[in-house]
Image (cartoon, rainbow, N blue to C red):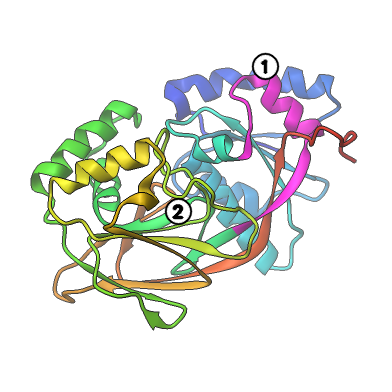
Amino acid sequence: MLIVNPASGKGRARKAIPRVLELAAGLGLELAVHETSGPGSASEAARTAPEGVDRLLVIGGDGTVNEVVNGLGERVAAGGGALPVALIPTGTSNSAARELGVPFDLDGAVAIAAGGDMRQIDLGVANGRRFFLCAGTGPGAYIVTELHRRRTGAITTFRYYRHGVRCFLFYGFPLAKVTVDGRPAGEPARMVVVTNMSHYGHPLKLVPDAKLDDGLLDVCIIRLRSRWSCLGVLWAMWRHRLEQRTDVEVLRVKTVRIEPADPSRPLPLQVDGDPGGELPVEISVLERAQGFFVSPAPDSGPAP
């Protein structure tokens, strides 16, 4: 099945359908097309994929992939079969595709969907919602919450930057308490991100050596000293050296709880770059819970 978010990439996703169908047919894949119609549509398509479907190709960005992953989780919970996912990236950040080494040209992405290796990766679960990339609170959660609340069209990199400026000027940077594997994780922090992948929206990285299938989540606890130190944190993410900062602590854990230090002050939560409600949040790991198609290893043969 080919699940398409037609709005992704300012319409590039919809325009890609004929070429993807042509390439897939040439590689022996017969695809049924499902175009999403709004929030929840991709999840529903994944959950109800008919018998005979052996993989899901997703044209869209990280938000569409998140919906598909959650729909597949509901499918398995209801007694249905697990299905692997192949990415055809057309979104704004495409962090999952970058992490898995999926090329951004249609020929390369469809070739991996047809004949790539299948890799089982860990997933996080935040208050029952699955994620493959990250979940957390702080400036990033404020930005995506405001962006979606105010959006009037396609999400672009410029819109992220614009709301980033609003965050720098108006966000209060309130504190959050963190508990990891049942133990308090020191002083409260102004930004906490629980991640399974290294990317935090291209080109930023949180934990460059994060492993997708080690059965653990990486918790970045960022105790910003001031509003201005937020710029230093961004610079460190850009240079992929966040862990070198003295106001950053990275822990590898199984479970995380994040809650407001001041219970009377709500704090936003983001999950895979989309609004995820408010704290508190309970986060745990599902080991090797979802298959994704990746580039074949140099010495591997064709996928079965």
Answer whether labels 1 and 2 touch (C-beta < 8 Å).
no
Image location of residue 130, percent across then percent down:
52, 60
Q: Is residue 119 magenta?
A: yes
Q: Relative to 214, is 59 above or below?
A: above
Q: Relative to 191, is 209 above or below?
A: above
| Numbered disc total | 2
Provide the secondary structure element on which disc 2 rests. Answer: strand
| Label 1 vs label 2, nearer the camera | 2
Residue type beneath disc 1? Arg
Foreground of the two, 233 or 296: 233
- Is any atom of residue 129 visible in this view? no
Label 1 neighbourhood size at 10 Å, few (<14), some (14-19), many (20+)? few
Foreground of the two, 21 or 180: 180
Provide the secondary structure element on which disc 1 rests. Answer: helix
Foreground of the two, 61 or 301: 301
Q: Which residue is mark 1?
A: 19
Quadrant that contains the N terminus: top right
Residue type beneath disc 2? Cys
The residue shown at (66%, 68%) is 77
Question: Residue lying farthest bottom?
Answer: 182
The residue shown at (41%, 33%) is 203
Image location of residue 245, percent across then percent down:
31, 52
Image location of residue 116, percent across then percent down:
78, 35
Which numbered circle lies on residue 134? 2
Label 2 neighbourhood size at 10 Å, few (<14), some (14-19), many (20+)? many
- Magenta extent: 100-122
For the residues marked 1 and 2, what is the alpha-carbon distance in whole angstroms? Answer: 32 Å
- Is any atom of residue 27 visible in this view? yes
First in sequence, mark 1 or 2: give its number. Answer: 1
The residue shown at (51%, 42%) is 64
Q: Is residue 179 magenta?
A: no
